[in-house]
Amino acid sequence: MSSVTSLPLHTQTSSVRDRVSPEEWEVRVKLAAAYRLAALHRWTDHIYTHFSARVPGPDEHFLINAFGLLFDEINASNLVKVDLDGTIVDDPTGLGINYAGYVIHSAIHGARPDLKAVLHTHTRDGIAVSAQKDGLLPISQHSIGFSGRVAYHGYEGVALDLDERERLVADLGDKSVMILRNHGLLTGGISVEHAFQQLHGLERACAIQVAAQGAGNAELVFPPREVVEKVEQQAKAFAAGDGPGVARHWNALIRQLERTDTDYKL
């Protein structure tokens, strides 16, 4: 299998950028940045998880990673474009895509046009919380911000069966945050930036929960219900994804990324 570094990246960049709309190229750059940021935060599981984003325009296409590239190898040009039926529209790498990724992401993109990006991780802490009967606990400011907003989907094995898409979508309902039981985390958003902000908060909430549960025999403190309800109301401004906080969060992340990595824009 060829590595990404053996691909003619500069030629590839020119040809891909020249054949897509400016709007699509902008989404490609943002999605590639999300992959690189996930690698920076160590939210990766080798080559086995996937982020996607809807391609702007009338065609029901979405972008996803080529199967075989690490997250820190993803750039704007080597993302694969696929339609909701699984037909590859454009694959500059020739590597194809992870079929399980297609099943999960096509389900959500097909049923939820409001979610322009869908991010899925297999982190240690995310899977640990997904394996707990009570799921995400309201024990931190981070987790309470997701109170009432998290959907759960039971584990059915590796997501290779197309009929699981119906149950996945039914379990997600009108929410944009989901914990996949015994599997991992998933967030959607009205933009790549919004989906990443939600993932950032959810990963942090899970890490805090696992750390708190591992602190010997310490009894967990649960805030009063009225406090939880207060934070739920306060968190609505972030949940919608259309406030200034999303852009500020994203721009700070990009500044952090670009101190060491600008290749995602190729």
Image (cartoon, rainbow, N blue to C red):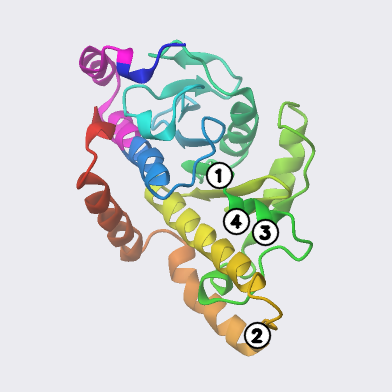
Residue 210 to residue 266: above or below: below
In-front residue for pair 220/187 = 220
| Residue hosting label 2 | 221
Q: Say which mark, if any, is on residue 125.
A: 4
Instruction: Identify the amino acid type marked 3.
Output: Val
Instruction: Name the residue beneath numbered marker 1.
Output: 121
CA distance for labels 2 and 1: 28 Å
Q: Quadrant of the C terminus?
A: top left
Q: Which residues are magenta?
A: 6-29
Q: Nearer the viewer, residue 50 or 191?
A: 50
Q: Name the magenta segment's main secondary structure.
A: helix
| Residue 30 visible to an observer of this rendering | yes
- Which residue sits at x=71%, y=63%? 135
Name the element at disc 3. helix
- Left/right placement of residue 99 relative to residue 242 reads right
Q: Quadrant of residue 87?
A: top right
Does residue 173 appear in the picture of this structure?
no
Contact, mark 3 vs mark 4 (Cβ under 8 Å): yes
- Near mark 4 (Cα within 10 A), the count class, few <14, some 14-19 or many ≥20, is many
Residue identified by numbered label 3: 129
